[in-house]
Structure formats: C-alpha cells, structure tokens
Image (cartoon, grey):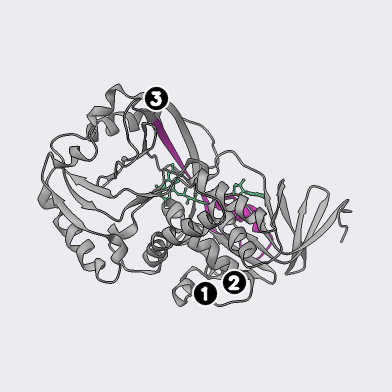
Amino acid sequence: MGRMVASVVTSARVVVVGGGIVAASVAYHLALRGVEVVVVDDDHAGAATAAGAGIICPWRAHADDARYRLSAAGARYYPQLVALLAADGETETGYATVGALCVAPDASALQPLADRLRARRENTPEIGDITDLQPGEPTRLFPPLAPNLAAVLVSGGGRVDGRAITASMLRAAVRHGAVTIRGTATLDQAGQQVRGVLVGADRVRADVVVVAAGAWTAQVCAGFGAELPIGPQRGQIVHACMAGTDTSSWPAVLPAGDPYLLAFPGGRVVFGATREHAGFDYRTTIGGIGGLLPAALAVAPGLGAATMLETRVGFRPVTQDGWPLLGWLTDGLVVAAGNGAEGLTAGPVTGRAAAALALGEKPAGYLAAFDPMRFQAAARF
Ligand SMILES: Cc1cc2nc3c(=O)[nH]c(=O)nc-3n(C[C@H](O)[C@H](O)[C@H](O)COP(=O)(O)OP(=O)(O)OC[C@H]3O[C@@H](n4cnc5c(N)ncnc54)[C@H](O)[C@@H]3O)c2cc1C
C-alpha cells in the first residue's frame, strides 16, 4: 500500500483529534496526569462548543438512564473542574451557579417536575433548593420575563461559557506539557490498527488516538467497519445585549420547550436554539432566527429593547439512538462524541472518561451503554 511520505514525524502517547470541549477535557486530564499528548484541531466553522448556550441543568429529564447519569455526573463535576483550573491559574471559564427557572404559565403544570426534582435531590444534593414561585415572582430574578409566568427555581442550576472553559482547559493542558497542532487529522492505520494521525504531510505517531471530533467524528473514523451513525444537528442561537443591566447572576430560564434563555455578565442575554437536520450547512437563516425572535419575546417581552449582538450557528453531534459514543472502536482508537444538546454539561466528564480509557483504565460501569461498537451490526445512519 502506498503511503504518504511524512515530512515531520513526532510521537506522543495519545493524540486527540478535535478542539471542542470534549477534546480539551481529554487533553487536560491526560496532561494533568503527566501523559504526553498532542491535540490536533482544524477549527471547523460550526464547532458546537463555540455556539453552545451553556445551560447546566440536566435534572429535569424523565428517565434515570445512562444518558441522564452522564449529564448529572457532568453537572456534579463542574465545581471540581473549575477548582482544578483555578489551581492552574485559569479563572475565566464563564462558569457560575446562577440557578435555573423552569417556567410555565400554569403553576400546576410544573408540579410533576417539582416532585421529580425533589425526589432526585436525595441522591443528588447539587440540585440545591427547589422553590415554587407564583406567577409574577420570577421577574424578580429575570426582569424581562412575562409577568404571567410561574416557575420552579432550581438553585443548583448553572451556566458556562463553552468557548472560555475550552480555551482554559487547552491552555492549562499546554502548561502541563500538551502540544497543539492546527490542521485536519486523518487516521494513520495499518489494517485494523490505528498508529497515530497524519496532518497534511506530517505524521504523529501515538499508542492511542482519541477522536473527539463532534459531528465530524464519522468522517474521521471512516474505514473502520460500518460508518458511525453520528452527524450534525444544526442549532442557531441569538446573543442580545441589555446595556447597563447587571445580568451576571440572572438564572437560566427553561420553558417546557424552546426557546430557553440565559445570561452572562455585561448585559449579555442568549436565547435559542433551533434544532435542524440541515447537514453541515453553516448558515444563519431567516426562518431559523425569524422563528426564535417572537418565541423569545413571548417568554421575555422585556427583551424587546435589547440590542442584537450576534447570531451563532453550531452542529450538535447527535447519534442515531441519541446516546453518545464513548469507548474503543478498534486497536489504538477511542471515540468520544455524540453528546448532542447536553454536551457542554457532559463534555468535561466525557473527556475525563475518554482519557481514562486511553490509559487502559475501566471507567464507571454505566458508560458501557455508550460503546461505539453497538452500531456495528446496525443499518447506516
Ligand atoms: C446552539 C447550541 C446550543 C447548545 N446549548 C447547550 C447548552 O445549553 N448546554 C449544554 O450542555 N450543551 C449545549 N449544546 C451542546 C454542546 O454545545 C455540544 O454537545 C458540545 O459542545 C459538543 O462538543 P464536542 O467537543 O463533542 O464537539 P465540537 O465542539 O463540535 O468540536 C469538534 C471539533 O472537532 C474538530 N474536528 C473535526 N474534524 C477534525 C479533523 N479531521 N481534524 C482535526 N479536527 C477536527 C472541529 O474543528 C471541532 O473543533 C448546544 C449546542 C448548540 C449548537
């Protein structure tokens, strides 16, 4: 078989493909443990981490399945991760426990949710206090809200700036010895064995490659059995500014369906998002944003005078069955992708688990449900 002649050959124990929150977490946790790691990212337009809203409030889910447990573990891990990063001099993560308002016009409609949250609190104290708010009360916490809305306030809800925490983890990884390369990686394989990656004409040899390439993961892993059933779900999202307003501690606002809203310091209010099957079509559309604006104003009429700052577009990595891919795909190849709409919540623990796998460790039992080999006999996506 004819091979490209590599102009530069480097090596590392682990190569991570990707530059989103999962890849950054893999790299950080490996580097923290003194493992030689190289990160290859091509900075695709539409990386989900750069567009994600940043809500961390996974406890509303109905099921107590492995998917829920991963997101819940993700939420639990955040304070610890932020402390680790702070010890590494990284304090700009955008993470804060600001609470979450689950809103509805009818307070009685919120009762089953409030009951579920209270039941979960026993084993999940990080959910915090659950407080029922009567119509009108939520506006004390998030002033632009419609006055007819009642809410259940979840004090443990949080938010994070996906761009900021990912950059923090990557910088800290580099400080611990990780190397980053800008470029598109393809797998360097010999039969069913992965031996590293090729980046242009350069070769990086590694004992293990971790592919954390989000919605692009199937392309990177093409060539190993059936195509992995993972692809993009487009999300368009709006950033607005309420100039002169202290929004830094406003809670996230979560209606039963979209749009959700959340706030960051500096008057920034974010709402979204669309969920579209549009392939890798990196565009803001009239229909997408045009649908979000009136829906957001119905929940929060007080946003009417806010300034439009920007729109963002990202491709959520979604799998055929809605569950992530986390595990070994073949010799030398670990896959960590597919966290869908909760990937900023679950990304750091997913990356930590992938780092453990790459070192030959056995992660927590429930992660077996995410074995990427589960699709090998199934139809293509
Ligand atoms: C609009 C929107 C709102 C969201 N809101 C939330 C939220 O509120 N809460 C929440 O928990 N989650 C949210 N999410 C989901 C979350 O953002 C994603 O699940 C998560 O960011 C996925 O991270 P990732 O690292 O797997 O993938 P990405 O962030 O997509 O990163 C993949 C990376 O792989 C790189 N790459 C791909 N192919 C190659 C290659 N061959 N070589 C080198 N590099 C390559 C790309 O350049 C990219 O950097 C939202 C997503 C969107 C789009």
Dot placed on the residue nearer the N-terminal end, 2 or 3: 3
CA–CA distance in space, label 2 to label 3: 43 Å
Specify whether 237 is left or right of 43: left
Question: Is the shortest distance between ligand 1 and the CB of mark 2 under 8 Å?
Answer: no
User: As shown in the figure, which amino acid type bears the numbered disc 1?
Assistant: Pro
Image quarter of residue 286 = top left
Specify whether 9 is left or right of 107: right
User: As shown in the figure, which amino acid type bears the numbered disc 2?
Assistant: Leu
| Residue 326 on the magenta segment | no
- In terms of secondary structure, where does tag 2 sit? helix
Asked whether residue 201 is in view, the answer is yes
- In terms of secondary structure, where does tag 3 sit? strand
> CB of mark 2 within 8 Å of CB of mark 1?
yes
Residue at (71, 52) in percent of width and height: 185
Asked if residue 211 is positioned above or below residue 240 in the image, the reply reads below
Q: Which mark is residue 363?
A: 1
Residue at image mark 2: 357
Q: Position of residue 348 (x, y in %)?
A: 50, 59
Q: Position of residue 71 (x, y in %)?
A: 40, 61
Residue at (13, 37) in percent of width and height: 148
User: As shown in the figure, which amino acid type bears the numbered disc 3?
Assistant: Met
Image quarter of residue 271 = top left
Question: Is the shortest distance between ligand 1 and the CB of mark 3 under 8 Å?
Answer: no
CA–CA distance in space, label 1 to label 3: 44 Å
Q: Residues within 10 Å of mark 2 (few under 14, many from 20)?
A: some
> CB of mark 1 within 8 Å of CB of mark 3?
no
CA–CA distance in space, label 2 to label 1: 7 Å
Residue at image mark 3: 308
